Image (cartoon, helix red, strand yellow):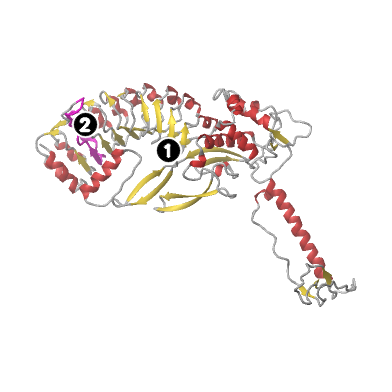
């Protein structure tokens, strides 16, 4: 922090005067063809070379050429070029081909080298710079990590650390920057690009990428891997070609890595380490969003008597290790998505250094501990998904600082305590999941400030008390799911103002077994339900409602037939 890239180097990686040419991007599969036609066989005897007089003015002379002797060849051991004109053209063609091959070879040695020419190099150049030494890069890395990991010098001295392994790989294995005898790199290197490649390599070694389920370690010289992805536009699975991590290919082509290109610079912008696909099944449903989602789909499958054909899953890539703090050195990183893996440990306070981060998604891992206050310093954050981990503690009142948040998804955790009233400051919030966690207290009335909210999941908590009347202010709410929580009392009058609501799950709230006990929702269903014309699912069994259903209930145009049937027997 506070230092420019130039400050980090004692000298420069740039090679002044070098300009990338079109030859840098040639087809590496080009090969020389067979010798062109126009040859004839002479009559020399076996094992002999025939001497032929040459008339330099004649176009009809046959010029002998030496060929490999074949003892089984009877009388056909000498090959002739037809004439001098053919000879001239042939020699010219060969020269052109040789020159082309040499040009290709030179061009290929420069392929994939990023170039940045500066007038003020950040290192003190030698008289004739040719390479960057191992020690210079080590010092550069130590300086770059200052304030983030102050023990980098000792980590680089430890041969078993991911940081030291990544540096060793960069010099002794990787050829992207032109490694030379294990301790030198080409001079013409963008220092930011070098740091970026190193940071990604640290993550690969820290999470033991060779044990990932896919695309973790190169298996051949191409470094390529195939990934099955679901294409929503086609509604089908497509096969995408990607690159293995730690391959010799551009790190921006490594699986899950997306870079933003601006001129000659390429900065990592997104890292998505999940494998999203659609599978086919009529009886099995898997969804990593929450266990409640699975229950909802199964309930509707049973109520509406139709098979569920498509289901979505996020495949585990078996990524283990701790949260990648080093990614903070990727200045343009906006999306970090590592779902359904084996990340462990705590969310570190250094998360505040991810200054460009807009979407943090780490659901269904093995992380623990309390959320650090520094998390709420990420003013650019628009999506926060941390469910499916063993996070504990309370939701900080600092949640109100994330005023640009569109989605907050906390589910299947050990987090407890009340939902802070500051939640009402998230005026742009579109999706809110606070479920399958022991949140307690009452639902704050400030929930009514979230007028952009379309989905609210608040099931299986120990939140008590009545649903606040302010819930009716959520004019865009479409899905409200609260089963298994400990609410009580009647549906508030303004509840019936939710005219965009399509799905209401409030079943099985009554609880007499574990504290806090509750009789669940009670009272009658108001005739004002006629205003909820978009309602499709209305599940309220397992409560203490009384009275008769109003006639208006039967006039709701979109309410599913079997969902009505499932509700009526439970009203008493």
Between 275 and 480, which is closer to the camera in this rendering? 275
Q: Is residue 54 above or below residue 108?
A: below
Mark found first going from the N terminus, 1 or 2: 1
Asked if residue 21 can be seen in this view, the reply is no
x and y, in percent, of residue 305 in the image: 22, 51
Is residue 36 highlighted in magenta?
Answer: no
Examine the rendering and report whether any part of residue 49 can be seen.
yes
Which mark is drawn over residue 494?
A: 2
Number of marks in picture: 2
Q: Quadrant of residue 487?
A: top left
For disc 1, the neighbor class at 10 Å (few under 14, some 14 to 19, many from 20) is: many
Q: Nearer the viewer, mark 1 or mark 2?
A: 1
Which segment is the magenta one?
Answer: 487-516
Main SS class of the magenta portion in the image: loop
Q: 403 above or below 117?
A: above
Tell me the quarter of the picture where residue 41 sits: bottom right
* Residue sitting at x 21%, y 31%: 494
In the figure, is residue 368 to the left or right of 441? right
- State the residue lying farthest toward the front: 71
Q: Which quadrant would the N terminus be assigned to in this image?
A: top right
* Mark drawn on residue 403: none
Q: Which mark is residue 341?
A: 1
Residue 164 in the image, given as x and y percentages of width and height:
59, 31
Let me know if residue 495 is in the magenta part. yes
- The correct choice, above or below, for 84 with respect to 172 in the image is below
Which secondary structure lies at badge 2? helix
The answer to which image quadrant residue 187 occupies is top right
Instruction: State the residue in front, 159 or 138.
Output: 159
Q: What is the secondary structure assignment of the residue under circle 1?
A: loop
Assess disc 2: are there few (<14), some (14-19) or many (≥20) residues with their C-alpha within 10 Å of its C-alpha: some
């Amino acid at each position: 922090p506070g230092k420019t890239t130039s400050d980090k180097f004692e000298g420069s990686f740039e090679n002044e005067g070098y300009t990338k040419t079109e030859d840098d991007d040639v087809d590496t599969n080009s090969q020389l063809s067979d010798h062109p036609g126009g040859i004839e066989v002479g009559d020399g005897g076996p094992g002999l070379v025939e001497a032929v007089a040459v008339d330099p003015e004649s176009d009809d002379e046959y010029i002998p050429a030496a060929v490999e002797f074949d003892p089984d060849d009877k009388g056909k051991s000498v090959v002739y070029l037809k004439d001098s004109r053919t000879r001239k053209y042939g020699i010219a063609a060969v020269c052109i081909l040789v020159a082309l091959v040499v040009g290709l070879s030179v061009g290929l040695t420069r392929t994939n080298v990023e170039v940045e020419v500066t007038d003020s190099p950040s290192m003190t150049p030698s008289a004739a710079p040719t390479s960057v030494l191992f020690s210079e890069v080590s010092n550069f890395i130590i300086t770059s990590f200052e304030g983030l990991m102050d023990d980098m010098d000792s980590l680089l001295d430890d041969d078993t650390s991911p940081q030291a392994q990544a540096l060793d790989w960069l010099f002794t294995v990787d050829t992207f920057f032109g490694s030379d005898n294990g301790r030198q790199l080409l001079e013409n290197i963008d220092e930011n690009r070098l740091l970026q490649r190193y940071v990604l390599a640290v993550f690969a070694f820290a999470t033991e990428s060779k044990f990932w389920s896919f695309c973790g370690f190169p298996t051949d010289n191409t470094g390529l891997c195939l990934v099955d992805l679901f294409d929503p536009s086609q509604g089908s699975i497509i096969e995408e070609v990607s690159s293995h991590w730690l391959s010799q290919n551009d790190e921006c082509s490594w699986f899950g890595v997306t870079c933003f290109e601006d001129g000659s610079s390429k900065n990592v912008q997104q890292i998505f380490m999940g494998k999203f696909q659609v599978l086919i099944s009529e009886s099995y449903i898997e969804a990593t969003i929450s266990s409640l989602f699975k229950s909802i789909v199964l309930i509707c499958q049973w109520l509406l008597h139709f098979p569920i054909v498509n289901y979505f899953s996020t495949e585990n890539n078996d990524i283990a290790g701790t949260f990648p703090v080093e990614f903070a050195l990727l200045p343009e990183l906006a999306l970090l998505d590592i779902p359904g893996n084996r990340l462990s440990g705590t969310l570190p306070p250094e998360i505040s250094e991810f200054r460009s981060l807009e979407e943090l998604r780490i659901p269904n891992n093995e992380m623990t501990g309390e959320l650090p206050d520094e998390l709420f310093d990420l003013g650019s954050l628009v999506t926060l998904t941390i469910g499916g981990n063993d996070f504990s503690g309370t939701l900080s009142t600092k949640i109100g600082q994330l005023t640009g948040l569109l989605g907050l998804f906390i589910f299947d955790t050990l987090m407890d305590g009340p939902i802070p009233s500051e939640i009402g400051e998230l005026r742009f919030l579109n999706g809110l999941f606070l479920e399958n966690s022991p949140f307690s207290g009452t639902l704050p009335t400030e929930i009514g400030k979230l007028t952009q909210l379309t989905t609210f999941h608040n099931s299986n908590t120990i939140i008590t008390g009545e649903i606040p009347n302010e819930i009716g202010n959520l004019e865009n709410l479409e899905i409200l799911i609260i089963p298994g929580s400990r609410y009580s009392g009647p549906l508030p009058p303004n509840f019936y103002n939710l005219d965009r609501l399509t799905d209401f799950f409030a079943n099985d709230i009554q609880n007499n077994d574990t504290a806090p006990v509750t009789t669940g929702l009670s009272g009658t269903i108001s005739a004002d339900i006629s205003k909820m014309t978009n309602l499709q699912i209305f599940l309220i069994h397992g409560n203490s409602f009384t009275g008769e259903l109003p006639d208006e209930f039967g006039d709701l145009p979109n309410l599913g037939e079997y969902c009505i049937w499932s509700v009526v027997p439970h009203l008493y």
